[in-house]
Amino acid sequence: MKKNHWYDYLWIWSILYFALGFFNILFAWLGLIDFLLPLIFAAAGGNKFFCNSLCGRGQLLNKLGSGCKLSRGKPSPRWFSSKGFRYGFLVFFLAMFGSMLLQTYTVAAGAASLSEAIKLFWTFRVPWDWAYTAGFVPDWVAQFSFGFYSLMLTSTLIGLIVMVLYRPRSWCAFCPMGTMTQSICKLKNRAG
Amino acid sequence: MLSKRLAAIDKGRCVACGACVKVCPRSALSVFRGCYAQVDGDLCVGCGRCAGVCPAGSINIKERVQA
Ligand code: SF4
Ligand code: SF4
Ligand code: SF4
């Protein structure tokens, strides 16, 4: 068996993140680490060390899927890993990220009021007002928290669904972070 | 003595996630510069564990072609 590293326990971080955000939505900002670290590794190191070793979500999906046998382990549909779907999903995801930033900006500019809710699958509004006391921080800081947490929760839920239906890490086939980092690595590699 | 079969990676389909690297009992796999997985043919014993976890279905176990 392979030796365990300290970073093999980062799946705990994945759970902790959602737990913290349940009690105080401002913790959602910590998710930016999971957003920036992979890009830094890819852009500076030209590697996928994040995906390959550090990603708590990948580890969690593996733990639940393989360890707890919650995955059917069936091969995922071929189109999951097709270039068209992967880049398409990345574009969609970035567009949703952009719209979340726009909403944050609108609140910052005073053109909209803070919405203390989580949006699941970009559609279902779930009240989340217990996790924030109005006025604690500027409204836009809170708005970003709700928006970012929604994005993290939605993508994790999609990850869990495809984990159950197919292989534990099926999500990784079209994970936007994975697609972005691999693309950066490929560009870097081609450039020399 | 090399095994009869070994893992072959479809580089165009591989998403470089590294799931295969983690399950290989022989440490025959690595992710090349974040681009795709590669197999060390001398180490691979063709057990197929990697093919079973690959989320992109980009690993096939093939007959080893003797050079
Ligand atoms: S593809 Fe996404 S979920 Fe999978 S290891 Fe990479 S960042 Fe994590
Ligand atoms: S077939 Fe077995 S030994 Fe060969 S690379 Fe895959 S997991 Fe490793
Ligand atoms: S598990 Fe599949 S997609 Fe992931 S690195 Fe290995 S061959 Fe590539």
Image: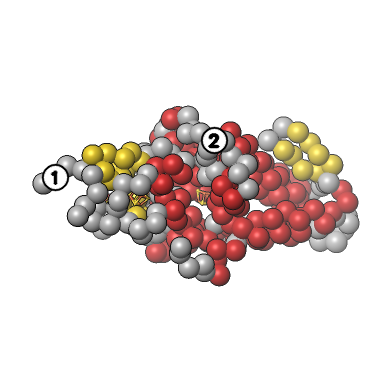
Q: Residue A153 falls in which quadrant of the image?
A: top right
Q: Residue A21 falls in which quadrant of the image?
A: bottom right
Q: Is residue A167 left or right of residue A155?
A: left
Residue depicted at 68% across the width and 35% down the height: A121
Task: For mark 1, name the chain.
Answer: B
Q: Nearer the viewer, residue A114 or A52?
A: A52
Q: Nearer the viewer, residue B33 or B18?
A: B18
Task: For mark 2, name the chain.
Answer: A
Residue A149: image location, x then y, percent? 71, 49
Residue A57 showing in the rendered view: no
Residue depicted at 65% across the width and 60% down the height: A12
Secondary element at tag 1: loop
Q: Is mark 1 within 8 Å of ligand 2?
A: no
Q: Is residue A127 left or right of residue A154?
A: right
Q: Amino acid at mark 2?
A: Tyr
Q: Nearer the viewer, residue A104 or A42?
A: A42
Residue A84: image location, x then y, percent? 43, 31
Q: Is residue A44 left or right of residue A143?
A: left
Question: Disc 1 designates what residue?
Answer: B66
> Can you tell which of label 2 and label 1 is closer to the viewer?
1
Q: Amino acid at mark 1?
A: Gln
Question: Disc 2 designates what residue?
Answer: A166
* Residue occupying the far left of the picture: B67
